[in-house]
Image (cartoon, rainbow, N blue to C red):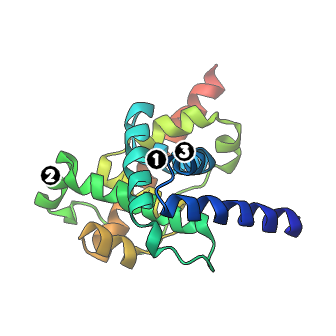
Amino acid sequence: MIVIHICMQKDLDKILKRCLKNDQRAQHELYHLCFERLMRICVKFQRNREDAAALLNDGFLKILLNLKKYDFEKDFFPWISTIMVRTAIDQYRKSKDYKETIDLHVDVYTYSGHDDAVVYNDVIDRMEQVEVDKMLHSLPENEKVVFNMFEMEGYAHKEIAEMLNISERSSKRYLQSAKARLKEMLEKKTEIKKVV
């Protein structure tokens, strides 16, 4: 397993070095090599596949433009994942939803300081990914972004607050609200399945 990883890393390093020389064929190879991983990130932040593909293209362009900053001693895929998430955040900041969110006072939510959302792992396991994606995309944009960054990408509230230009407290409230909405959706989903 380690030998395969080393061989893949050597091949990747060759492609990256060719990309640094503006080799378009290498850029194409890199795009296909990274596509699936980057698209998984993009669909978490976008409501439809076309918007996710556009986001991926923006992120990939940033990866190419910043490739000279990449440290070949470090793992490449976490580096590109970070760029992709930051591209999604930048796009969100430019959106109408973000501008409206900043204008609102977020103290309308009550945050208790602990997570009381019930986890329905067995239900989620049985649900198709399409259903889960629909539920996530039905969240208000600010809640969806914070939920994805915290739960899916592993960012801390402090990091989320800095990237989105909101307070840590607001980040926690958005997460709490997203979890409450998801819990409600899951409860409705399980009630429907019981009836059917």
Q: Which quadrant of the figure contains the C terminus?
A: top right
Residue 58 location in percent, x, y? 36, 49
Chain-order first, disc 3 or disc 2: 3
Residue drawn at (17%, 46%) of the image: 96
Residue drawn at (62%, 58%) of the image: 15
Residue type highlighted by circle 1 = Cys
Q: Judge from the rendering whether residue 75 lies leftward or rightward of residue 186; answer left or right.
A: right
Residue 20 location in percent, x, y? 49, 64
Quickly name the residue at label 1.
42
Residue type highlighted by circle 2 = Glu
Residue 41 location in percent, x, y? 50, 51
4 relative to 40, above or below: below
Number of numbered discs: 3
Q: Is residue 111 visible?
A: no
Quickly name the residue at label 3.
28
122 relative to 149, above or below: above
Could you say which is closer to the camera, residue 144 or residue 62?
62
Closer to the camera: disc 1 or disc 3? 3
52 relative to 151, above or below: above
Chain-order first, disc 1 or disc 2: 1
Could you say which is closer to the camera, residue 4 or residue 178?
4
User: Label 1: how many residues lie within 10 Å, few (<14), some (14-19) or many (20+)?
Assistant: many
141 relative to 107, above or below: above
Residue 142 location in percent, x, y? 30, 54
Quickly name the residue at label 2.
100
Chain-order first, disc 1 or disc 3: 3
Q: Judge from the rendering whether residue 101 lies leftward or rightward of residue 74; answer left or right.
A: left
For label 2, the SS is helix
* Quarter residue 164 falls in: bottom left
Residue drawn at (24%, 70%) of the image: 166
* Quarter residue 130 falls in: top right
